Image (cartoon, grey):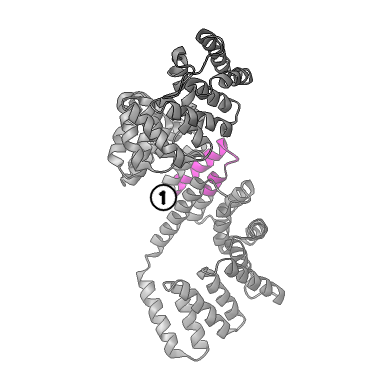
Amino acid sequence: MLNKLGLGKVALSEKLLFVSITLGTSLLSFNPARAGRGQGAAPVQPMQSVREFKRRFDVAAADYQARRYSEALDELKQLLRKSPESFEVNELTGLVYIGLGKEEGANAYLAKAVRLNPQSAPAQTALAANLMSLHRPKEAEPHFRMAAELEPRSYDANHNLGEYYVQIGRLAESIPYLQQAQQIKPMAYDNGYDLALALVRTGRVDEARLQLQSLLKLQDTGELHSLLGEVEEKAKNYVAAGQQYELAARLDPSESNIFNWGVELLLHQTLEPAIAVFKAGLGRHPQSAQLYIGLGIAYYGRAHYDEGARALCQAADLKPKDPFPYTLLGRACQVVSPTMADEVKAHLRRFVKLAPRNASAPYYYATCLWQRDQGQQDPARLVEIESLLKSAISLDPQYADAYLQLGLLYVGQHKYNAAISQYRRALKVNSSLADAHYRLGQALVRMGDTKRAQQEFAVFEQLHKQEVAEADKQRSEIQTFVYNMRAAEGSGGP
């Protein structure tokens, strides 16, 4: 399960850990004898008396707990004028600023509180959590670490540091702290989930399985079965993986759980069940672009090309700026019916307008135009296709397929020298492009250079023998679609 700060189950800023921790220790154990001083600071005269100072501080703390932040801040400002070196007053002022949504203003007070009393684990945590909310994770790390060193048997201190490492993507470093937190509080579900997640993503699948099985005894949830499905997938226990993804979707028919179940079926070529899963999922989540993409791929695998293209068009309509469904439509253009081809072309034309910096946009639109109407195109259409392919190459000079397609276009116009130049450019980018060797050989034959043509045909034959059987090629292509789809879903799209 992803969140905006990283991989962890719940963002630190959402948990407000520092509020409960700090109020439970520092603020509610206010010591009047220290009210006017920090560590090593000279005593400061109280406003009227230590008793009065404590009374007013208690009023501010009560206002803070009641979320009357403005009233609390007014009281604290008066206390700070008289006792600017008070650890408790600086700490509470920082928390009040956070309550007001002024994290930048809070930081100075929280940092000062830590300087005044560096042995306070809650103060270290409060400062670290605020730095995270300010997107300053490197500065937060030493304070989370210090809190854990000060309180090595604290669940919160270990969990917070482990969660910090999860959220910045340093998963291996998170594991010891999450494990320590789990030992201290075995019933902690969120910590246990993040521990399992970190173990999965670092390849420790056997440990992850044990952790998840332990958590399932506490709570039988869809997300645990989904993560266990990922564990079994990584362990190559594909039947078990499918069973876990199915359990997850049945327990919690969320978009992501249905998606994961359908994807697992796609990966292993159980296409009819995959179609059924995606269609049922769309009955629950009719605005899900990713479910439409999955359905499109499943139909494609079954050679139901029009149905697949229709599903992909739906996905593109739901997320017009997501490039992934358009790339699939570009590949499907040549195999759909003429009526469906018109709809595909319209969507690819829109993609060109929506993604002016994406080389795939003009490439797929050009190939669709060329493949659908070869032999029937007027000169103006050929000029348009050539312009689109050159645009793709300009946007991405390493686009081997665009050079190859441009070469094919030139051959169709009997411009063999120009075609040869494009094929060679394609092979300079990707020397293993078998079709480019074959097409280059053909063009060389046309130009009378049979010796070099035979060399290219020989390379083509060698590469062709290395290719998998046609059924495996289709399976590989579907798996490539699925892996790309998962990557696009994980990144959140553009």
Residue at the bottom extreme of this rendering: 448
Answer whether residue 377 is visible to the viewer in this image: no
Q: Nearer the viewer, residue 171 or 151?
A: 151
Residue 288 drawn in magenta: yes
Residue at the spot 45% in from the left edge and 59% down from the top edge:
477
The percent coordinates of residue 266 (x first, y second) are 44, 49
The percent coordinates of residue 468 (x first, y second) are 37, 65
Residue 390 drawn in magenta: no
Dominant secondary structure of the magenta stretch?
A: helix
Q: Nearer the viewer, residue 287 or 470?
A: 287
Residue at the spot 50% in from the left edge and 91% down from the top edge:
448
Residue pointed to by mark 1: 267
Q: Quadrant of the N terminus?
A: top left
User: From which residue to which does the magenta span run?
Assistant: 270-295
Q: Is residue 24 left or right of residue 82?
A: left
Above or below residue 444? Residue 338 is above
Above or below residue 167? Residue 435 is below
Above or below residue 384? Residue 410 is below
Residue at the spot 52% in from the left edge and 39% down from the top edge:
281
Q: Is residue 329 left or right of residue 172?
A: right
Secondary structure state at the residue bearing disc 1: helix
